[in-house]
Amino acid sequence: MKSDDIKAAALKYFAVHGYEGASLSQIADEVGMKKQSLYAHFKGKDDLFMQVLRDAKETEMSFTLPYFNRAGTQNPEDILHAFLRQTVELFQKDEQLKFWLRVSFFPPAHLAEAVGKEFADTEEKVRTVLQSAFQRWSEAGAIADLPADTPALAFMGIIDSLMLSLVYDDDEKKLMDKLEALWTVFWRGISRR
């Protein structure tokens, strides 16, 4: 379990101070070991960072993918709106998701390509599960008849906009007003009239 303890401490420092501001000495002190002992668990700071990143990625995927995979063919309005609200709440509270969010905007320069691949993989998986859900809703007549990729990409755009607000704006009311405005326009665009 020592690796998990190390990753938990690393998450704390990476989330608050970024890659550059977190030191292996601080992380080792946090778990009560010498810096050199970290190398028995991780190849170095880059390896530790990428493992913490992959854990955060898994946390997001363990929420998003099952959420839409189990979505039925009814009530897409409630399902989608609830997802946006829950996503904002999770990203505000969960340390791994806060870290995931920070790294998405501010990756360490020398790891930007590796980090980018993790985010691209996540985006592709989310897009695929969303397309499938929108296809089911369209076939069931629960939303307008659109190519499934169109509402999936638009919905991902809403999520991206909310993530940007979570990084740069700590005004809860503004964030929720933005969510509701985006939601209203989006839903009008895909609902059956």
Image: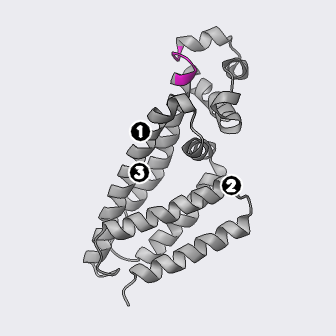
Secondary element under disc 2, as helix, strand or loop, is helix
Q: Earlier in the sequence, mark 2 or mark 3?
A: 3
Secondary element under disc 3, as helix, strand or loop, is helix
In the image, 115 versus 80, the foreground residue is: 115
Give the image location of residue 15, x and y in percent: 66, 38
Q: How many neighbours does mark 3 have within 10 angstroms: few (below 14), some (14-19), or many (20 or more)?
A: few
C-alpha span from label 2 to label 3 = 21 Å
Q: Is residue 122 above or below residue 151?
A: above
Q: Which residue is mark 3?
A: 123
Magenta-colored segment: predominant secondary structure: loop
Which quarter of the figure is the C terminus placed in? Answer: bottom left
Marker disc for residue 130: none
Q: Residue at x 44, y 48 (%)?
A: 61
91 inside magenta stretch: no
Indicate the colouring scheme.
Answer: one colour
Q: Which residues are magenta?
A: 41-46
Q: Which residue is mark 2?
A: 168
Q: Which residue is mark 1?
A: 117
43 inside magenta stretch: yes
Amino acid at pointer 1: Lys
Give the image location of residue 86, x and y in percent: 56, 62
In the image, 188 versus 74, the foreground residue is: 188
Amino acid at pointer 3: Glu
Numbered circles on residues, count = 3
Q: Residue at x 72, y 69 (%)?
A: 173
**Circles 2 and 1: CB atoms closer than 8 Å:** no
